[in-house]
Image (cartoon, rainbow, N blue to C red):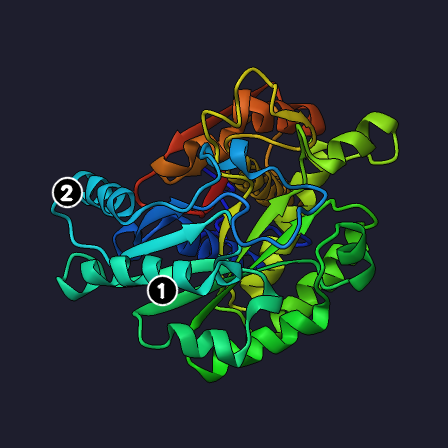
Protein backbone atom coordinates (compact mmCIF):
# COMPACT_ATOMS: atom_id res chain seq x y z
CA UNK A 1 0.00 0.00 0.00
CA UNK A 2 1.22 3.53 -0.71
CA UNK A 3 -0.01 7.10 -0.72
CA UNK A 4 -2.39 6.14 2.05
CA UNK A 5 -4.29 8.78 3.98
CA UNK A 6 -6.31 8.40 7.17
CA UNK A 7 -8.40 11.07 8.87
CA UNK A 8 -7.11 9.93 12.25
CA UNK A 9 -3.46 9.59 11.39
CA UNK A 10 -1.26 7.90 8.81
CA UNK A 11 0.79 9.25 5.96
CA UNK A 12 0.88 12.98 5.51
CA UNK A 13 -1.11 14.14 2.48
CA UNK A 14 1.03 15.08 -0.53
CA UNK A 15 2.01 18.71 -0.72
CA UNK A 16 -0.87 20.77 -1.97
CA UNK A 17 -3.45 18.31 -0.61
CA UNK A 18 -5.29 18.84 2.65
CA UNK A 19 -7.81 17.01 4.78
CA UNK A 20 -10.32 18.69 7.04
CA UNK A 21 -9.25 17.06 10.29
CA UNK A 22 -12.04 18.66 12.31
CA UNK A 23 -14.76 17.32 10.00
CA UNK A 24 -13.06 13.93 9.76
CA UNK A 25 -12.97 13.56 13.52
CA UNK A 26 -16.53 14.83 13.78
CA UNK A 27 -17.71 12.15 11.37
CA UNK A 28 -16.02 9.36 13.32
CA UNK A 29 -17.50 10.70 16.55
CA UNK A 30 -20.92 11.01 14.94
CA UNK A 31 -20.83 7.45 13.67
CA UNK A 32 -19.63 6.13 17.02
CA UNK A 33 -22.40 7.94 18.88
CA UNK A 34 -25.12 6.63 16.55
CA UNK A 35 -24.07 3.03 16.02
CA UNK A 36 -21.71 2.00 18.80
CA UNK A 37 -22.21 1.33 22.51
CA UNK A 38 -25.45 -0.48 21.80
CA UNK A 39 -25.50 -1.99 25.30
CA UNK A 40 -25.68 1.51 26.78
CA UNK A 41 -28.75 2.48 24.78
CA UNK A 42 -32.09 1.83 26.47
CA UNK A 43 -34.18 -1.18 25.62
CA UNK A 44 -37.40 0.55 24.61
CA UNK A 45 -40.79 -1.14 24.98
CA UNK A 46 -43.07 0.80 22.59
CA UNK A 47 -46.74 1.29 23.38
CA UNK A 48 -48.46 2.96 20.43
CA UNK A 49 -51.40 5.31 20.89
CA UNK A 50 -52.24 6.31 17.27
CA UNK A 51 -53.64 9.87 17.19
CA UNK A 52 -54.83 9.47 20.78
CA UNK A 53 -54.93 12.74 22.67
CA UNK A 54 -54.58 14.77 19.50
CA UNK A 55 -56.96 17.76 19.31
CA UNK A 56 -57.06 17.41 15.50
CA UNK A 57 -55.14 15.74 12.71
CA UNK A 58 -52.07 17.35 11.17
CA UNK A 59 -51.94 17.46 7.37
CA UNK A 60 -49.24 14.77 7.18
CA UNK A 61 -50.66 12.41 9.77
CA UNK A 62 -52.15 8.95 9.57
CA UNK A 63 -50.67 7.04 12.47
CA UNK A 64 -52.34 3.68 11.82
CA UNK A 65 -50.04 2.57 8.97
CA UNK A 66 -47.02 4.14 10.68
CA UNK A 67 -47.52 2.24 13.94
CA UNK A 68 -49.45 -0.77 12.71
CA UNK A 69 -51.85 -0.23 15.61
CA UNK A 70 -55.53 0.68 15.75
CA UNK A 71 -56.80 3.68 17.66
CA UNK A 72 -57.56 2.81 21.29
CA UNK A 73 -56.22 3.15 24.83
CA UNK A 74 -54.84 -0.22 25.94
CA UNK A 75 -56.50 -1.72 28.98
CA UNK A 76 -54.31 -2.51 32.01
CA UNK A 77 -54.32 -6.16 30.93
CA UNK A 78 -53.27 -5.32 27.36
CA UNK A 79 -50.57 -2.96 28.56
CA UNK A 80 -49.06 -5.47 31.00
CA UNK A 81 -49.21 -8.23 28.40
CA UNK A 82 -47.31 -6.15 25.85
CA UNK A 83 -44.67 -5.10 28.35
CA UNK A 84 -44.17 -8.69 29.55
CA UNK A 85 -43.85 -9.90 25.95
CA UNK A 86 -41.05 -7.43 25.23
CA UNK A 87 -39.32 -8.24 28.52
CA UNK A 88 -39.40 -11.94 27.61
CA UNK A 89 -37.64 -11.31 24.30
CA UNK A 90 -35.13 -8.89 25.81
CA UNK A 91 -33.07 -11.76 27.17
CA UNK A 92 -30.68 -11.58 30.08
CA UNK A 93 -28.40 -8.85 28.76
CA UNK A 94 -28.83 -5.90 31.09
CA UNK A 95 -29.76 -2.58 29.53
CA UNK A 96 -31.76 0.33 30.86
CA UNK A 97 -35.38 -0.56 30.11
CA UNK A 98 -37.82 2.20 29.18
CA UNK A 99 -41.55 1.83 28.67
CA UNK A 100 -42.42 4.31 25.92
CA UNK A 101 -45.72 5.78 24.73
CA UNK A 102 -45.55 6.84 21.08
CA UNK A 103 -47.80 7.76 18.18
CA UNK A 104 -50.16 10.07 20.02
CA UNK A 105 -50.21 13.16 22.19
CA UNK A 106 -49.68 11.62 25.61
CA UNK A 107 -50.40 14.64 27.80
CA UNK A 108 -53.44 15.40 25.66
CA UNK A 109 -55.14 12.23 26.91
CA UNK A 110 -57.82 12.36 29.58
CA UNK A 111 -56.20 12.70 32.98
CA UNK A 112 -57.65 9.37 34.12
CA UNK A 113 -56.02 7.64 31.15
CA UNK A 114 -52.67 9.35 31.77
CA UNK A 115 -52.67 8.24 35.40
CA UNK A 116 -53.81 4.71 34.57
CA UNK A 117 -51.12 4.15 31.91
CA UNK A 118 -48.38 5.60 34.11
CA UNK A 119 -49.54 3.68 37.18
CA UNK A 120 -49.51 0.30 35.43
CA UNK A 121 -46.14 1.02 33.83
CA UNK A 122 -44.69 2.21 37.14
CA UNK A 123 -45.35 -1.19 38.69
CA UNK A 124 -42.70 -2.67 36.39
CA UNK A 125 -40.25 -0.02 37.55
CA UNK A 126 -41.12 -0.65 41.19
CA UNK A 127 -40.45 -4.38 40.73
CA UNK A 128 -37.10 -3.69 39.06
CA UNK A 129 -38.23 -4.99 35.65
CA UNK A 130 -37.96 -1.56 34.01
CA UNK A 131 -36.01 1.57 34.78
CA UNK A 132 -38.20 4.46 33.62
CA UNK A 133 -41.02 5.71 31.41
CA UNK A 134 -40.89 8.00 28.38
CA UNK A 135 -43.54 9.49 26.13
CA UNK A 136 -44.01 11.85 23.19
CA UNK A 137 -46.37 14.80 23.33
CA UNK A 138 -47.14 18.15 21.73
CA UNK A 139 -45.30 21.23 23.01
CA UNK A 140 -48.58 22.97 23.89
CA UNK A 141 -49.53 20.20 26.33
CA UNK A 142 -46.58 20.99 28.59
CA UNK A 143 -47.78 23.14 31.46
CA UNK A 144 -47.31 23.17 35.26
CA UNK A 145 -50.61 21.36 35.90
CA UNK A 146 -49.84 18.40 33.66
CA UNK A 147 -46.26 18.19 34.91
CA UNK A 148 -47.58 18.12 38.48
CA UNK A 149 -49.88 15.29 37.37
CA UNK A 150 -46.97 13.07 36.31
CA UNK A 151 -44.31 14.11 38.84
CA UNK A 152 -44.92 11.15 41.19
CA UNK A 153 -44.32 8.63 38.38
CA UNK A 154 -40.89 7.46 37.17
CA UNK A 155 -40.98 9.43 33.91
CA UNK A 156 -37.45 10.26 32.77
CA UNK A 157 -37.79 11.31 29.12
CA UNK A 158 -40.23 13.53 27.26
CA UNK A 159 -40.13 13.91 23.47
CA UNK A 160 -41.66 17.00 21.93
CA UNK A 161 -43.22 16.90 18.46
CA UNK A 162 -41.63 20.17 17.39
CA UNK A 163 -41.65 19.51 13.60
CA UNK A 164 -40.63 23.09 12.75
CA UNK A 165 -39.70 26.37 14.43
CA UNK A 166 -41.35 28.41 11.67
CA UNK A 167 -44.86 29.51 12.66
CA UNK A 168 -45.94 29.78 9.03
CA UNK A 169 -44.92 26.18 8.35
CA UNK A 170 -46.58 25.01 11.57
CA UNK A 171 -49.80 26.75 10.54
CA UNK A 172 -49.76 25.19 7.06
CA UNK A 173 -49.22 21.78 8.65
CA UNK A 174 -52.23 22.37 10.93
CA UNK A 175 -50.08 21.75 14.01
CA UNK A 176 -52.06 24.10 16.24
CA UNK A 177 -49.05 25.25 18.24
CA UNK A 178 -46.29 27.79 17.74
CA UNK A 179 -42.52 27.91 18.06
CA UNK A 180 -43.01 29.86 21.28
CA UNK A 181 -44.93 26.89 22.71
CA UNK A 182 -41.87 24.75 22.02
CA UNK A 183 -39.58 27.24 23.75
CA UNK A 184 -41.84 27.36 26.80
CA UNK A 185 -42.18 23.57 26.93
CA UNK A 186 -38.43 23.05 26.75
CA UNK A 187 -37.91 25.51 29.60
CA UNK A 188 -40.50 23.85 31.86
CA UNK A 189 -39.11 20.37 31.22
CA UNK A 190 -35.53 21.47 31.83
CA UNK A 191 -36.57 23.14 35.09
CA UNK A 192 -37.90 19.77 36.26
CA UNK A 193 -34.81 17.92 35.06
CA UNK A 194 -36.44 15.71 32.44
CA UNK A 195 -34.42 14.36 29.54
CA UNK A 196 -35.84 16.25 26.55
CA UNK A 197 -35.99 14.97 22.98
CA UNK A 198 -37.21 16.93 19.98
CA UNK A 199 -38.65 15.62 16.75
CA UNK A 200 -38.34 17.73 13.61
CA UNK A 201 -39.61 17.16 10.08
CA UNK A 202 -38.17 18.18 6.72
CA UNK A 203 -40.15 18.74 3.55
CA UNK A 204 -43.30 20.10 5.20
CA UNK A 205 -45.59 22.32 3.11
CA UNK A 206 -44.11 25.80 2.90
CA UNK A 207 -40.71 24.68 4.15
CA UNK A 208 -37.41 24.50 2.29
CA UNK A 209 -33.74 23.82 2.98
CA UNK A 210 -33.12 27.28 4.41
CA UNK A 211 -36.15 26.95 6.69
CA UNK A 212 -35.06 23.49 7.86
CA UNK A 213 -31.59 24.76 8.74
CA UNK A 214 -33.11 27.71 10.59
CA UNK A 215 -35.37 25.35 12.55
CA UNK A 216 -32.40 23.14 13.40
CA UNK A 217 -30.47 26.15 14.70
CA UNK A 218 -33.39 27.21 16.89
CA UNK A 219 -33.89 23.66 18.17
CA UNK A 220 -30.20 23.41 19.01
CA UNK A 221 -30.52 26.70 20.89
CA UNK A 222 -32.98 24.97 23.24
CA UNK A 223 -30.31 22.35 24.14
CA UNK A 224 -32.33 19.14 23.70
CA UNK A 225 -30.71 15.91 24.87
CA UNK A 226 -31.38 14.26 21.50
CA UNK A 227 -33.18 14.82 18.20
CA UNK A 228 -35.08 12.73 15.66
CA UNK A 229 -35.36 13.85 12.03
CA UNK A 230 -38.30 12.65 9.95
CA UNK A 231 -38.81 13.25 6.21
CA UNK A 232 -42.35 14.21 5.25
CA UNK A 233 -44.02 11.45 3.25
CA UNK A 234 -47.50 11.41 1.76
CA UNK A 235 -49.61 8.87 3.65
CA UNK A 236 -52.93 7.56 2.37
CA UNK A 237 -56.02 9.14 3.95
CA UNK A 238 -54.09 12.22 5.04
CA UNK A 239 -54.89 15.79 4.01
CA UNK A 240 -51.45 15.89 2.41
CA UNK A 241 -52.57 13.07 0.12
CA UNK A 242 -55.35 15.29 -1.21
CA UNK A 243 -52.93 18.17 -1.74
CA UNK A 244 -50.49 15.90 -3.54
CA UNK A 245 -53.22 14.55 -5.81
CA UNK A 246 -54.28 18.10 -6.61
CA UNK A 247 -50.68 19.07 -7.36
CA UNK A 248 -50.47 21.69 -4.61
CA UNK A 249 -47.88 19.75 -2.58
CA UNK A 250 -44.70 18.21 -3.98
CA UNK A 251 -42.57 16.14 -1.56
CA UNK A 252 -38.79 16.21 -1.47
CA UNK A 253 -36.93 13.93 -3.84
CA UNK A 254 -35.04 11.11 -2.14
CA UNK A 255 -31.53 12.34 -2.97
CA UNK A 256 -32.41 15.89 -1.99
CA UNK A 257 -33.85 14.73 1.31
CA UNK A 258 -30.92 12.46 2.16
CA UNK A 259 -28.46 15.31 1.61
CA UNK A 260 -30.52 17.72 3.69
CA UNK A 261 -30.87 15.29 6.60
CA UNK A 262 -27.15 14.50 6.37
CA UNK A 263 -26.29 18.18 6.74
CA UNK A 264 -28.71 18.58 9.65
CA UNK A 265 -27.29 15.50 11.32
CA UNK A 266 -23.75 16.83 11.05
CA UNK A 267 -24.91 20.20 12.37
CA UNK A 268 -26.55 18.68 15.45
CA UNK A 269 -23.54 16.51 16.14
CA UNK A 270 -21.27 19.54 15.90
CA UNK A 271 -23.48 21.02 18.63
CA UNK A 272 -23.02 17.77 20.63
CA UNK A 273 -26.71 16.87 20.23
CA UNK A 274 -27.19 13.19 19.28
CA UNK A 275 -29.50 12.36 16.39
CA UNK A 276 -31.04 9.07 17.48
CA UNK A 277 -33.18 8.43 14.41
CA UNK A 278 -33.43 9.53 10.79
CA UNK A 279 -36.46 8.40 8.80
CA UNK A 280 -39.72 6.71 9.70
CA UNK A 281 -39.62 3.42 11.55
CA UNK A 282 -40.34 0.67 9.04
CA UNK A 283 -43.43 -1.40 9.74
CA UNK A 284 -45.32 -4.13 7.94
CA UNK A 285 -48.38 -1.92 7.61
CA UNK A 286 -46.36 1.00 6.29
CA UNK A 287 -44.86 -1.04 3.47
CA UNK A 288 -47.95 -2.96 2.33
CA UNK A 289 -47.73 -2.87 -1.43
CA UNK A 290 -47.23 0.89 -1.55
CA UNK A 291 -50.88 1.39 -0.58
CA UNK A 292 -50.06 3.42 2.51
CA UNK A 293 -47.21 5.58 1.20
CA UNK A 294 -48.31 7.49 -1.87
CA UNK A 295 -45.23 9.65 -2.41
CA UNK A 296 -42.20 11.11 -0.70
CA UNK A 297 -38.73 10.07 0.47
CA UNK A 298 -39.53 6.89 2.37
CA UNK A 299 -36.96 4.11 2.65
CA UNK A 300 -36.92 1.38 5.32
CA UNK A 301 -33.20 2.08 5.84
CA UNK A 302 -33.23 5.85 5.46
CA UNK A 303 -30.54 6.30 8.12
CA UNK A 304 -28.31 3.93 6.18
CA UNK A 305 -28.71 6.13 3.09
CA UNK A 306 -27.64 9.18 5.11
CA UNK A 307 -24.55 7.51 6.51
CA UNK A 308 -23.73 6.05 3.12
CA UNK A 309 -23.65 9.55 1.66
CA UNK A 310 -21.39 10.64 4.51
CA UNK A 311 -18.97 7.85 3.65
CA UNK A 312 -19.11 8.86 -0.01
CA UNK A 313 -18.34 12.47 0.91
CA UNK A 314 -15.41 11.36 3.05
CA UNK A 315 -13.90 9.13 0.37
CA UNK A 316 -14.31 11.67 -2.43
CA UNK A 317 -12.85 14.53 -0.37
CA UNK A 318 -9.83 12.36 0.39
CA UNK A 319 -9.47 11.49 -3.29
CA UNK A 320 -9.52 15.18 -4.20
CA UNK A 321 -6.87 15.94 -1.57
CA UNK A 322 -4.38 13.30 -2.75
CA UNK A 323 -2.60 12.24 -5.93
CA UNK A 324 -3.41 8.56 -5.73
CA UNK A 325 -3.37 6.83 -9.09
CA UNK A 326 -6.75 6.57 -10.72
CA UNK A 327 -6.46 3.17 -12.39
CA UNK A 328 -7.54 1.34 -9.27
CA UNK A 329 -8.53 2.32 -5.74
CA UNK A 330 -8.59 0.47 -2.46
CA UNK A 331 -10.86 1.76 0.31
CA UNK A 332 -10.50 0.27 3.77
CA UNK A 333 -13.10 0.67 6.50
CA UNK A 334 -14.14 -1.12 9.67
CA UNK A 335 -15.95 -4.42 8.84
CA UNK A 336 -19.24 -3.00 10.08
CA UNK A 337 -18.96 -0.08 7.64
CA UNK A 338 -18.63 -2.10 4.43
CA UNK A 339 -22.29 -1.65 3.52
CA UNK A 340 -22.31 2.10 4.20
CA UNK A 341 -19.13 2.61 2.20
CA UNK A 342 -20.28 0.58 -0.78
CA UNK A 343 -23.76 2.11 -0.74
CA UNK A 344 -27.01 0.35 -1.50
CA UNK A 345 -26.54 -1.70 -4.69
CA UNK A 346 -22.90 -0.50 -4.84
CA UNK A 347 -24.06 3.04 -5.55
CA UNK A 348 -21.06 4.72 -3.90
CA UNK A 349 -18.60 2.48 -5.71
CA UNK A 350 -20.12 3.28 -9.09
CA UNK A 351 -20.24 7.02 -8.35
CA UNK A 352 -16.55 7.06 -7.37
CA UNK A 353 -15.56 5.13 -10.49
CA UNK A 354 -17.51 7.52 -12.70
CA UNK A 355 -16.38 10.72 -11.01
CA UNK A 356 -12.69 9.88 -10.90
CA UNK A 357 -12.56 7.68 -14.02
CA UNK A 358 -11.35 4.69 -12.01
CA UNK A 359 -11.47 1.25 -13.52
CA UNK A 360 -11.58 -0.72 -10.28
CA UNK A 361 -12.70 0.20 -6.73
CA UNK A 362 -12.40 -2.35 -3.95
CA UNK A 363 -13.83 -1.84 -0.47
CA UNK A 364 -12.15 -4.07 2.11
CA UNK A 365 -12.74 -4.63 5.83
CA UNK A 366 -10.00 -3.54 8.23
CA UNK A 367 -10.68 -4.37 11.91
CA UNK A 368 -7.82 -2.09 12.96
CA UNK A 369 -9.83 0.98 11.95
CA UNK A 370 -12.42 2.69 14.09
CA UNK A 371 -16.03 2.62 12.99
CA UNK A 372 -16.56 5.64 10.76
CA UNK A 373 -12.89 5.82 9.75
CA UNK A 374 -11.83 5.58 6.11
CA UNK A 375 -8.44 4.95 4.49
CA UNK A 376 -7.75 5.04 0.78
CA UNK A 377 -4.82 3.86 -1.29
CA UNK A 378 -3.77 2.18 -4.54
Tags 1 and 2 touching, CB below 8 Å:
no
20 relative to 63, above or below: below
Residue nearer the viewer, 369 or 133: 133
* Residue 77, x across and y down, in percent: 24, 45
Q: Is residue 181 above or below residue 207?
A: below
Q: At which x and y percent is residue 88?
A: 16, 40
Q: Nearer the viewer, residue 335 or 181?
A: 181
Residue pictured at 61% horizontal, 19% vertical? 291
Q: Is residue 19 visible?
A: no
Looking at the image, residue 247 lies above or below residue 29 = above
Mark 1 neighbour density, 10 Å: few (under 14) some (14–19) many (20 or more): some
Looking at the figure, which quarter contains the N terminus?
A: top left
Q: Which mark is residue 298?
A: none
Q: Position of residue 187 (x, y in %)?
A: 56, 80
Left or right of 94, for residue 98 = right
Q: Position of residue 55 (x, y in %)?
A: 63, 55
Q: Nearer the viewer, mark 1 or mark 2?
A: 1
What residue did someone put label 1 on? 115
Q: Is residue 191 left or right of residue 151?
A: right
Q: Identify which residue is drawn at 67% across, 35% down.
A: 233
Mark closest to the chain's N terminus, 1 or 2: 2
Q: How many marks?
A: 2
Secondary structure beneath dot 2 equals loop
The residue labelled by disc 2 is 91
- Residue appearing at x 54%, y 41% in the figure: 311
Amino acid sequence: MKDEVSPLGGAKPPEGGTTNRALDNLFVELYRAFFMNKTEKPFVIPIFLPNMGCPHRCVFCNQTPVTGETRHIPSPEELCSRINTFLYYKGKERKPVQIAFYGGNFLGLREDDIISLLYESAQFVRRGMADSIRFSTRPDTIDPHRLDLIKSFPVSTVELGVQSMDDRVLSMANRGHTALDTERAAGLLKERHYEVGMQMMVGLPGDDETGAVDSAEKIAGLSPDFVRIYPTVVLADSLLAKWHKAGTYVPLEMDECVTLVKNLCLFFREKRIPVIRMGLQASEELEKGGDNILAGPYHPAFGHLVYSEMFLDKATSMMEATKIGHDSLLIRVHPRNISEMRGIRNRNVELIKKRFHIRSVNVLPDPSLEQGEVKIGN
